Amino acid sequence: MCMQQVCALCCGMTTCCFVVSVQKKPLSAVIKEVCDGWNLPGPDNYALQYADGVQTYITESNRLDIKNGCILRLTKAPGRCAEDLYKGIQSSDSGVRCDSLKELASVSTDVTFAQEFISRDGHLLLVKIVEDSHEYVIVMSLTAVIMTHTLTGFMELMDHGIVSWENLSSIFIKKIASFVNGKSSDASIQQVSLDILESMVLSSHSLFLQVKHEVTMERLIAHLQVTNQQIQTKAMALLMALLQTAGDSDRQVLLFPHVDCVFCPNKTAYLLQNIIHSSGSVQDEMAHYLYVLQSVTLNHLEPRMKTPLDCYSQEQRDILHGLRQAAFETESENSLSHERRRSLCAKEFKKLGFSNNSNPGQDLVRTPPGLLALDTMFYFAARYPDAYSRFVLENSSREDKHECPFARSSIQLTLILCEILRIGEPPSETGSNYHPIFFSQDRLMEELFCVCIQLLNKTWKEMRATQEDFDKVMQVVREQITRTLSSKPTSLELFKNKVNALNYSEILKLRQTERLHQEETLAPPVLELKERLKPELLELIRQQRLNRLCQGTMFRQISSRRRQDKLWYCRLSPNHKMLHYGDVEEDMENPPIETLQKQIPVADIKGLLTGKDCPHMKENKGKQTKEVLDLAFSITYDVEEYSLNFIAPSRTDFCLWTDGLSVLLGREMSSESMRSELEILLSMEIKLRLLDLENVPIPDSAPVVPKPPSNYNFCYDFSQTEQ
């Protein structure tokens, strides 16, 4: 089979467009055939290129990806194009230079062109342009445009991984950093410069050290306070790259430059004011970076959480005795005998709530929470001494077994907070669940502890608890904290008000409502009704999945070097017969179906693969994280080697697409999202049908049907009137 030219449009002397069906000839023969048809000399100077979407060059390695109906264009060969642009960039005419650099920024996304341009040391030419630039000249409009195109082209070339970032000179790195540090720099230049610095940081530790030295934390914070969301996002990306690449000591310096200041002013309030509370909504990528910043910052507590108390450490023993003295204000201990002083200390440690009152350090040997529990107790006693004394003295005066043990409660509460805040867990590549309250407090863990330990004492009294009820009280407190944090409070004061309003009686009401709901939905007649309703509701979910596929989704190709990458969009045709997809720009939210030039007939889809079975996961075996594997899926079509590979932006999108594709293939939906939605719909439908039976008990079994009468010879005589 040969290439069939269905139509042709002349576009000047060197280009033409045509529709491709099938081809098996060598690519050079195909190009020669087309050139001969148009009387174009020198077929070696031409190449085929996609006419729509990302205009990728056709090579022997990717020609099998051409689908029937794709529109290709005959254009300059990559080598000739690279040579022309290389010369144009060196032109003395600034207009020619600007046009050449603009075209370079566009075509550099193609790896074939990038290889040709880099083979001519074109990337070094761009480096020289940057190194020779002068900051006071770049403020001029044309020069700023030229520099933007230069940096964009350089970034696209480096993004292919053909040359190493480590070959860059320190002069170049300083110049890029100066674009970021300069207050008068053009916004477009700053944006791409931040992007370049992020890639440098992620590429090697030596470049990380240079970038950390050149770009200060104060400058990054200044970029986070601007109104330009793109600048904010790129600045956050660089900040997260610095934090995640840094070692423990470097990360400590970046996060906490003033470690000697115990109660230093908040360092992240600008994020709360300029990003979280800004007029625009927080975008997915920014939400991810906020989540990463929260995780990395809180994880600095992990060493303390995993370190047990050293009973031989004089410093740690002094802290324990300091807690005791702050609670009971013991006077003139030095005048007492050793035995008397030891007996008094043991008695007071017992009142303080330590299980091992003769050696209280043994209570803090368990990890987690380890020394972190000692830190939170000491913080509470030092920061809020009146509340601390009131807690301890109030419980010391209660009758036996009704006192709330401060030390035991503090240790368990610290462990609960560590679990809720996920301290010690590395940040997920796709996570975006951040707590706004984190950005209103420098020491979130300690401040939450101070609020929650007083909440625990309040809940203990409301439950009239004894020592035997300790675990029950801690379960209630955990529920109070979890429910309150799920409402996303933006300040500690708001959290305090909400968590205290959610008292024990409110928790009981919520539990009772949930229990009644569960009991009524487990009755046999209700279960039978559910089974009858399932087919109708499953059909409703199927229709919703297909409608969602018709709306389409934007997918991002996540690379190993940086999180942001090229975007593409995929959607199902309204008649459910064709999948349309193609590359899109980041600011295009819902591209029309006509702009998505690539198509796959649904009838040609043979299978649906997920996780590690996907071709693009097998190619990078061992390099993919569990989060990426959980979001990966592929469809195979025509024959097994053809596939369209996806990485869903979220678990919800993964469930929607795998369910929708299963429906198209005539299979059963199997995602956890489908099961959850089915339960919700069943629950709502059951509730609506049971409204007429309110306060009517539902029997476990149907009522007994009486036996039929021995005969049916009976009737009612209406002729007789009642007396």
Image: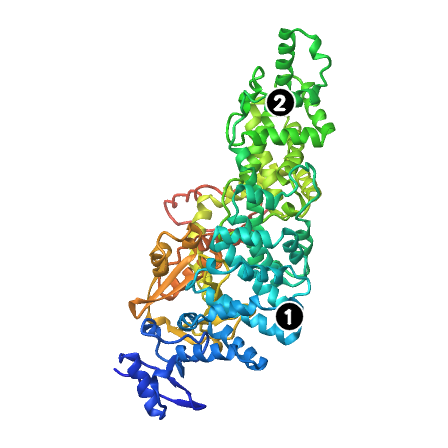
Circle 1/circle 2 CB separation < 8 Å: no
Kind of residue at disc 1: Ile
* Color theme of the render: rainbow
Taking depth in this image into account, of 648 and 603 the one nearest to the observer is 648
Q: Position of residue 176 (x, y in %)?
A: 58, 62
Query: Taking 259 as reference, is 671 above or below it?
Result: below
Taking depth in this image into account, of 613 and 317 the one nearest to the observer is 317
Q: Position of residue 194 (x, y in %)?
A: 57, 60
Q: Which residue is mark 2?
A: 320
Q: Is residue 80 visible?
A: yes
Q: Which mark is residue 467?
A: none
Q: Is residue 197 left or right of residue 387?
A: left
Dot 1, crowdedness within 10 Å: few (<14), some or many (≥20)?
A: many
Q: Which residue is mark 1?
A: 138
Q: Secondary structure at mark 2?
A: helix
Kind of residue at disc 2: Leu
Q: Position of residue 550 (x, y in %)?
A: 47, 69
Residue found at x 72% / y 28%: 385
Residue found at x 62% / y 43%: 256
Residue found at x 37% / y 83%: 45
Q: Position of residue 630 (x, y in %)?
A: 42, 53
User: Which quarter of the figure has residue 39?
Assistant: bottom left
Query: Taking 155 as reference, is 309 above or below it?
Result: above
Task: Name the front one of labels 1 and 2.
Answer: 1
Give the residue at the far bottom of this rendering: 39
Q: CA distance from mark 1 to mark 2?
A: 61 Å
Residue found at x 59% / y 24%: 316
User: Which quarter of the figure has residue 342?
Assistant: top right
